[in-house]
Amino acid sequence: MQKRNFDLIFQPRRKNDKNLLSGWQSIGKIKIRVLVTTTVLVSLLLVTQLVFAASLATDGRKLSEIGSEIQRLEAENTTLKAKIAQAASLATLSEKAQVLGFEKPTKVITP
Amino acid sequence: MDRIRIFQIIFLIAVAAIVLRLFYWQFIAKVQGNFNSYATEGILPVSRGEIFTSDGFPLVTNQEAFLIYAKPYEIKNNGQKIAQQLAPFLISEKYATGEAQITDEIKRQKEEAIKTKEKDLQEKLSNKNLFWVQLARKIPLEAKIKIQSAKITGLGFEKDDRRFYPEASMAAQLLGFVGSDKFGQDTGYFGLEGYYDRQLRGKPGRAQQEKDPFGFPILVRSYRSIEPQKGASLYLAIDRSIQFKVEENLRQAVEKYGAKDGTVVVENPKTGRILAMATYPTYNPKLFSEFDQTIYKNPAVADTFEPGSIFKLITMSAAMDLGLVNPNTRCDICGGPRQIGGFEISTWNKKYYPDSTMTEIIVHSDNVGMTYVAEKLQTDKFYDYITKFGFGAKTGIDLQEESPGSIRPKKDWKPIDLVTASFGQGIAVTPIQMVQAVSVIANGGKLLTPKIAYKTKDGQKEEKVLPDDEKQVISPKTASQITEMMVAAVENGEAHAYAPRGYRIAGKTGTAQIPVAGHYDPDKTIASFVGFAPADDPKFVMLVRFNQPSSSPFGSETAAPTFFEIAKELFNYFGVLPTG
């Protein structure tokens, strides 16, 4: 069995380098496939995670915007509700009715 | 060294640099107290529950408002200019009226308030040791916009909603107000706000979240949050239209009769629900701190007074329920004043009616006649009935400041106490106790707990506010007999001229002297009228009470006309037709 020299992996490929070729060959065809497949899978997973992370970062921004919009609408809703209630108050209506010439009923009217 | 080795070294240095930089941001920068830590934990504010009248109108709702704060260390110089800019927006809202409408005196007060505020603000802003200082709370949106437009550095705002009253001061003493407790939290005081504070205030939420350097949430991180729970809303039996009519009439009457104050309570005797409860003078709950604190309590439940002649109904009910007298029983001691325990008991107008029937005693509001009834009853039985009618204990109405009134312990009663109590002197009751007791007569002898709210609504969950179990205090027959006596009192009594024609109204006037320093003040009275209508199928029980009316001391000339004025409007409102 030949001695493995992994340092050679980082060496530039030299033509007719018998030692290197013999080192790789010694791993065997099946083992090379496993190594390549794992590398591809890990790379894919890393890319997927990056894609998701990027997507989530965008979603964080969207969530923040939606949160602000909800707050704005709730505040507007509160203000409008208060305005409607004030416009419909009996004090306001009674004042307007008086200006328009309405009078209090003095007799009971039944249908 | 070959090129590969150089490349390896550069690569390792770069990796080490990145790791070191990350370590710095993760640990060193954080440990040194950088306030921009990306993990935030905050309180999520919650809105207080609203209060609605029976027609679903919000009598109390919320309005957007803000807390304004400053970071003095970010403010250049001593902040004098900023204080001058801010002060006009942070003074009391009572000065918010347009310049053209305010008097010179108010203008002077406003200028003084601005100066005081300026001084206070400058003091806060010049303290550079403070990182954060609160300048004012609950400032309105309009003020916030104006302040923001001035683009002042070092100022900030936080959401700090406040109560809003669309009907202004309507039912103020009934509602109570919201102030701050010692921790600065919104808390309800007095009235419904005080009684239902726990339900109305809700539960603030908490949120813990990590944010990136731009302030956006990092979604891949897990964070815990507790959702805020909005306060429950309160739905009242108070009828807004009746409340409005009652308040309008009461204000006019208090001014007309020159009374110190006045109270009106209107109740549905069949359900115990309060339809209206008004007091004048009143206050604006939005500006509660600008008013005298003595006005905060609701006199309808907190004030005790000697009821005077309206209490004769209770004495007569007890004696008739026990079968000791009936409407036609004749009083054989009613021909003149009586001496009891060293005191002279006389009638209010010094007129005497020998051999009066029990009905006539009520019609003439005869004190001597009541001594006859009291002596038939004796202390034990009378005391038992007073207790059964609910006097001397809280009625259980849903208002915070209710008083139990004051009835002397039975063992301390002397013969004179029995006699004076029979015509409503020497005992102290609250207006709501009196309304509850007369409702017993209007409701066939059954006592119901008066209630103002009829339900609370917490999200989708509704909870009814139910009165306590009803109790039979007097028999339906007695209730009916007393009703007829009350009708006779309205039709033939002192106030008959004011009663609307064609309606059977059951009622009784009352004029009670006020005890001052151990004796009764001859010039100060509490004038009242209590009754219900229509007598055969009552739609309402009403009490009108004036404290120290100056135009006339008598209930028949002040409280009774007011009662009938309001009753006329209620007949129109309920569609009750005249029968005669």
Image (cartoon, coloured by chain):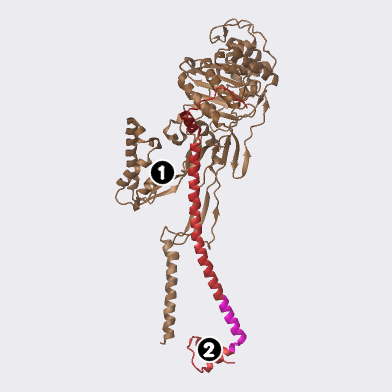
- Disc 1 residue type? Glu
Residue at the location (33% across, 39% down)?
B114
Give the chain letter for red. A
Question: Could you classify mark 2 by the number of other residues whose Cα lies within 10 Å: few (under 14), some (14-19), or many (20 or more)?
Answer: few
Q: Which residue position holds label 2?
A: A5
Colour of the chain lettered B: brown
Residue at the location (58% across, 78% down)?
A38
Q: Which residue position holds label 1?
A: B142
Q: Is residue A108 visible?
A: yes
State the predominant SS element of the stretch in magenta.
helix
Q: Looking at the rendering, in which quadrant would you find the C terminus of chain B? A: top right
| Boundaries of the magenta span | A26-41
Q: Is residue B136 left or right of residue B520?
A: left
Q: Is residue B302 visible?
A: no
Task: Residue B226 in the image: state x and y as whole percent.
Answer: 55, 52
Residue closer to the observer: B379 or A95: A95
Q: Is residue B288 left or right of residue B340?
A: left
Q: Looking at the rendering, in which quadrant would you find the N terminus of chain B? A: bottom left
